[in-house]
Amino acid sequence: MTNSTLERLAPWLFTIALFVIWEAACRIFKIDPFVLPAPSEAFAAMYQYRWPLMRHSFVTLWTTMAGFTLAVVFGIVLGLMVGWSRTIYRGIYPVMIGFNSIPKVAIVPILVVWFGIGEIPAILTAFLISFFPIVVNVATGLATMEPELEDVLRALGARKLDIMLKVGIPRTQPYLFGSLKVAITLAFVGTVVSETIASNAGLGFVMVQAGSNFQMPLVFAGLLLLAVEGIAMYAVFAAVESHFTRWAFRSSMSAAA
Amino acid sequence: MFPARSRGNKFAAMSLVDINRVTLTYKGASGGVLALQDTTLAVPQGDFAAVVGPSGCGKSSLMKLVTGLVPPDAGHISVFGDPVVGPVKIAGMAFQNPNLLPWRTVVENVLLPLEIVEPHRRRFRSEKAKYRERAETLLNTVGLHGFADRYPWELSGGMQQRVSLCRALIHQPALLMLDEPFAALDAFTREELWCVLRDLWQENRFTVILVTHDLREAVFLADKIHMMSARPGRIVLTRVIDLPRPRELDICFEPAFQNIVHELRIKIAEVRKA
Ligand SMILES: Nc1ncnc2c1ncn2[C@@H]1O[C@H](COP(=O)(O)OP(=O)(O)OP(=O)(O)O)[C@@H](O)[C@H]1O
Ligand SMILES: [Mg+2]
């Protein structure tokens, strides 16, 4: 086996090894399945409840994507505004940092009061938890523009909007796409937090229900599906990133991930 | 490829750049820094001026003042006979760092000023092919034939600096401002680019202000060398270089050339001590 095939297979080998060790540990130490079910039991539960699990996985996926899409739109707009003007930056930043330090779990009950139990609190929680890294990265991309390049353009009579369109916005792309990978995984956290508190659908809801029925294999099946969704979406945005910002990987400028 | 400058006659008698008793202070948290004090400097139309001086004496600041990127605290600056109140809109600039946009190809980088400067800006879409041709011609003259569609990262540092020069010249500016453009290059590439710049200037006779630390570079290229004092910067000496043109690199080894360099070196040592 050559080195490069080994490298390509490494993630799979590592994952399989993890499951094998987990399975072996459960068997050798005879761990109570109420404490930690073996992966084989989790997969069995996954198979047994495949239809409901599929439906709930889909709910989690689309609410996450909806919240994430909101975060992208809002995050880009706010990031551009913050990067555009120092006054806006000064005004908004403290509020935003304060807001970002509030645990989003604390906000879910408020959302429930406003919007009732269901998908909307999940979407909003996903949105609230994931927009911050997008704003910060877009603003950073604008703020780190080379001053000399700005001088070159201003000496040509470029207006601020010209500089923004020709340099600022293209230059923030690697920062933006880098942040999307982080934001999408955070969005899953937001959705599931909301689903565990106030929902009647989604993987978070399934896990809470299964937990209260002592169906630990099903809880773990839910966890595994969540991980799979997270990895898949991360991979999608990593691919999007490397497609759109190939120049950033080739040149010395590197994205903030 | 540059049109003959009809304004030349009208302004022949006067300076294209006129800096008159200018003072500049940078305000910082720990008090102000007096960068320039009572600096006076005139550059006639079509002249090649070099500015030399100790590090930190305000050479880059002078460039920013001339292009209107920062306003002076006192004094008067005019370009083309008009007082400078904001960015001058006609100057081409290049720095030590080529500052190319990595997401644009070489030719797209060169075309950038035309997307900004009027009247090209208005015509840019409809006459893209013509402009592209112009950019490629310019790239050919600096020895970058066949590199138009490469990306900057595929080019060496010297090649990137050539692209940066092309970008500064594509809109046929009346004024070219160069801030240590060759400082990061190796000696051979640097001398090669001196010749590139010499030829471009000889052909088109735009006005150049070149900031440099390299006295040989200044003597080889310039009509006049202005030497600045340590901070706060003032022009303490203006030396006319009357070596015949066109100058070939061999001139660097002639006694007349070396005498001037030597003389300037002694002066700059005095200035730094003072
Ligand atoms: N943006 C700024 N804010 C505050 N002080 C500045 C700023 N830019 C320059 N200065 C100060 O002004 C002085 C002159 O700076 P300038 O960059 O013009 O020097 P320079 O002659 O170009 O130096 P070098 O040869 O090293 O490039 C320096 O002492 C520097 O500390
Ligand atoms: Mg400088």
Image (cartoon, rainbow, N blue to C red):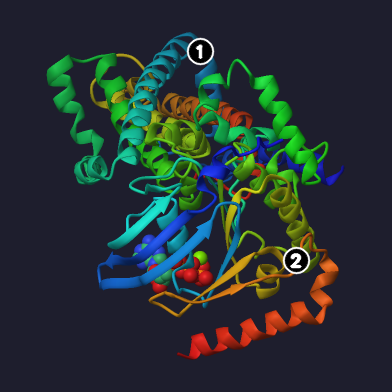
- Image height check: is A246 above or below B133? below
Mark carried by residue A50: 1
Amino acid bearing label 1: Arg
Depth order, front residue of B77/B92: B77
Percent coordinates x, y for residue B37 in the rendering: 35, 72
Depth order, front residue of A60/B159: B159
Residue displayed at 46% across by 27% down? A226
- Image height check: is B157 above or below A114? below
Percent coordinates x, y for residue B139 in the rendering: 75, 40
Amino acid bearing label 2: Asp
Depth order, front residue of A64/B268: B268
Position of residue A143 in the picture relative to residue A175 (left or right)? left
Depth order, front residue of A226/B73: B73
Q: Which residue is mark 2?
A: B186
Percent coordinates x, y for residue B177 in the rendering: 55, 54
User: Residue A106's quadrant in the figure?
Assistant: top left
